[in-house]
Image (spheres, rainbow, N blue to C red):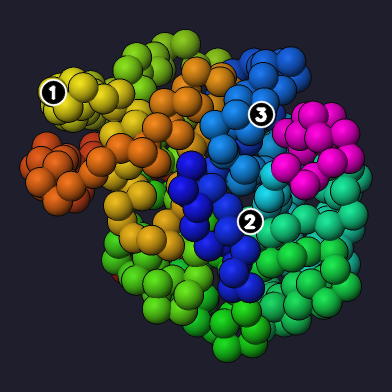
Amino acid sequence: MKQRQIRQDGKLVSEIGLGCWSFGGSYGPTTEKEAHRTLAAALDLGVDFLDTANVYGMGVSEKIIGSFLKGDTSRFTIATKAAIWRDPDTGKRGFNNKADYLRDELEKSLTRLGTDHVDLYYIHRRDQEVEVEDLMETLLGLKAEGKIGGIGFSEISPATLRRAVAVGSVDAVQSEYSLWTRQPELGMIQTCAELGVAFVPFSPLGRGVFAPVPPDPATFEDGHFRKGTPRFSEPNFTYNLQKISEFKALAADLNVSPITLAVAWCLAGGPHLIPIPGTRTAGHLAECAAGSAFPMTSEIMGKIEGVLPVGWAHGDRYTHDQWVGVEGYC
């Protein structure tokens, strides 16, 4: 597995990481045993970059990673996040970027992961009541204490990134980016490249639609993240599957899994892109990791663009409630 730079200090990770949101049950039930098999497969495949968060399963994802590592964090570079709070009884959520809250949540994450520091600490969502300059001072303080190795932000705008960088070093920005979610091309990918910041695409497989067998929205139970989202609701979903079938036909012509091709397309977006596909199974992870070795060419990129041009997807990627906290910039 080839490597790319994740931090400004030159730290390298596998150019494809593993998103661990699904370990918390957001896409359906899973088990610790199954998640451990996936983590073991990651090591075998050379995937050494894990992405999790305090709210993934309300701590479940971090606990599963911690129980696998058993105190030995040397085999993985681990990123986690904080700033989103949820009421487990009402489901109500909000954002908190205050220093005391972030420090407390970090300590809880470290306990669940079984370590005394985390390699990268993201602000999961901006709390607009806290100026980003003050937020950076908090994060720089945690870094100086050795609690975190690097600073990251999730779903911010290029303008916010520039304000943050004016205070101190920012290592990574994470945003949704895939063949059906391409807003970061309108400034974020370019700004990260200019500032030497890693860009970490999450959901590079379109929340499962680029898998050989697409998800069936009829099976989504209450609480399932994709239930009710516009792209997975009719008539949008049928339109989307029709377009994706053309992409899958192209993958078949190239004798490659559509999963592998989608990840390879993402990698080709720039040397600072480090996609983190999420999966609960070792088999799917192997298809993702194969994207690192796929011989992408400008000709193939052109064919993909011809099949799935910018803006082809039907429906928004989030519901109205899910959009809260995502910074717009166009």
C-alpha separation, residue under disc 2 versus residue under disc 3: 23 Å
- Segment colored magenta: 60-75
Residue 1, percent across and down? Answer: 48, 42
Q: Secondary structure at mark 1?
A: helix
- Which residue is under mark 3? 39
Closest to the observer, 111 or 326 = 111
Query: Disc 1 residue type?
Result: Asp
C-alpha separation, residue under disc 1 versus residue under disc 3: 31 Å
Query: Disc 2 residue type?
Result: His
Q: Secondary structure at mark 2?
A: loop
Residue located 58% across and 53% down the image: 13
Disc 3 crowd rating (10 Å Cα; few below 14, some 14-19, many 20+) is: many
In-image side of 127 versus 213 (left or right)? right
Residue located 10% across and 41% down the image: 303
- Which residue is under mark 1? 253
Closest to the observer, 300 or 107 = 300
Query: Disc 3 residue type?
Result: Leu
